[in-house]
Image (tube, helix red, strand yellow):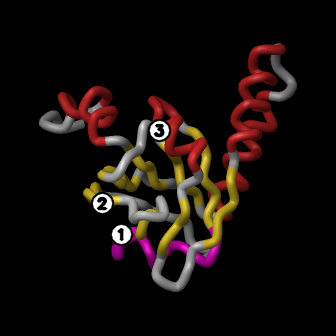
Amino acid sequence: MSESAQFLGRYDHCLDAKSRLILPAKLRPMFGTIAFLTRHHESCIAIWREEEFKIELLKKQALLSQDTEARNLVRAWSASVVEQDIDKQWRILIPQELRKYGHLQNEVIVVGVIDHVEIWSPEVWQEQVGALEEQVL
């Protein structure tokens, strides 16, 4: 697990009846037994491996020396962080507060975004990214 994560791809999935996400098979080898879930940009939920989460924490820590607004943003983000076990069937529980933030219901889109994984509501994904999917960087 010391190698840097390279999460890529889009996967259409569903949350189960207990609000758990089954990690897509191609993403599983990069995860251990825990993951960190956070609120993320544009109303998605980020899933971090421990290694990348530590790097994200350092970025947030640097913001604490800025103004009050930056510190309050870090406080709100920190309060939303959830450490979750990944069970033997590769399921991760998505807490109600994060589901509400991400507008997640049954169907979700899971996207690998290089150093983390994002969970999107299909409607929010379409709003934010849908029109750009046909373009090439």
Which SS does the magenta portion mostly show?
loop
91 or 77: nearer the viewer:
91
Q: Are marks 3 and 1 in contact (CB under 8 Å)?
A: no
Tag 2 or tag 1, which sits nearer the N-term? 2
The C terminus sits in image quarter: top left
18 or 28: nearer the viewer:
18
Tag 1 or tag 3, which sits nearer the N-term? 1
Query: Residue extending furthest left?
Result: 134
Q: Are marks 1 and 2 in contact (CB under 8 Å)?
A: yes
Judge whether residue 32 is colored magenta.
yes
Q: Which residue is mark 2?
A: 13
Judge whether residue 25 is colored magenta.
yes
| Amino acid on which the number 2 mark rests in the picture | His
Residue at left offset 34%, top offset 73%: 26
Q: Which residue is mark 1?
A: 24
Residue 121 x, y percent position in the rendering: 35, 41
**What's the mark number on residue 137?**
none
* Residues packed near mark 1 inside 10 Å, few (<14), some (14 to 19) or many (20 plus): some
**What's the mark number on residue 102?**
3
Residue 81 x, y percent position in the rendering: 69, 47
Q: Which residues are magenta?
A: 23-34
Report, in whole angstroms, how far the alpha carbon at label 1 lies from the one at label 2. 8 Å
| Amino acid on which the number 1 mark rests in the picture | Pro
| Secondary element at image label 1 | loop
Residue at left offset 79%, top offset 31%: 75
Q: Residue 64 appears in which quarter of the rendering?
A: top right
Is 100 displayed left or right of 131 in the figure?
right
| Amino acid on which the number 3 mark rests in the picture | Gly
* Residues packed near mark 2 inside 10 Å, few (<14), some (14 to 19) or many (20 plus): some
Q: Residue 39 appears in which quarter of the rendering?
A: top right
Query: Residue extending furthest right?
Result: 65
